[in-house]
Image: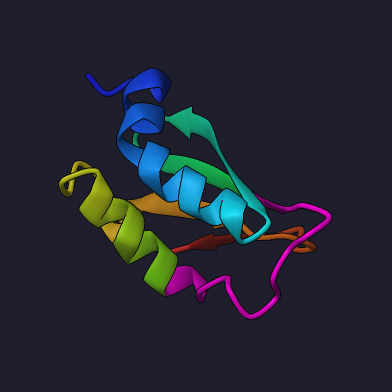
Amino acid sequence: MTTIKDVKAALAPMMVSMEADGYRLDVLEVGATLNLKITALGNACPDCLVPAQLMARMVSAELNNAYTPEGISIEYPNDSKRHSH
């Protein structure tokens, strides 16, 4: 069973990289769908955040395909709806 702690550990390098670009990646829920949220920080680089479909593929790869890109839902900054793939 995959836990939030497991997902955070696997995504830690990505989280550090995103923080350098001014974004925080949070793991909200682990279940049938992996729910993530990206928050823009004060120093966010608007050109540094990749499109949602690419982000889902990157997350899936970091998790050794424990979740397919289609099984990952990502809430982007200033976006009230989730990007499911």
Q: How many marks?
A: 0
Residue 9 falls in which quadrant of the image? top left
Relative to 43, 67 lies left or right: left
Q: How is the image coloured?
A: rainbow
Query: Residue sitting at 17 percent across and 49 percent down?
Result: 65
Residue sitting nearer the eye, 70 or 49: 49
Does 13 sit left or right of 16 as displayed? left
View extreme (bottom): residue: 47
The correct choice, above or below, for 48 with respect to 62 in the image is below
The single residue placed furthest to the left in the displayed view is 64
Reply yes or no: does residue 32 show up in magenta: no
Q: With respect to residue 44, does 14 lie above or below?
A: above
- Which segment is the magenta one? 38-53
Q: Is residue 28 above or below residue 25?
A: above
Quadrant of res 25:
top right
Q: Which of the 4 quarters of the picture holds residue 28?
A: top right
Near-viewer residue (53 or 84): 53
Out of 78 and 17, give the one closest to the viewer. Answer: 17
Looking at the image, which residue sits at the far right? 42
Q: Is residue 42 visible?
A: yes
The residue at 32%/61% (across/down) is 58
Quadrant containing the N terminus is top left
Q: Kindly tell me whether residue 31 is visible in this rendering.
A: no
Main secondary structure found in the magenta portion: loop
x, y (%) of residue 84?
48, 61
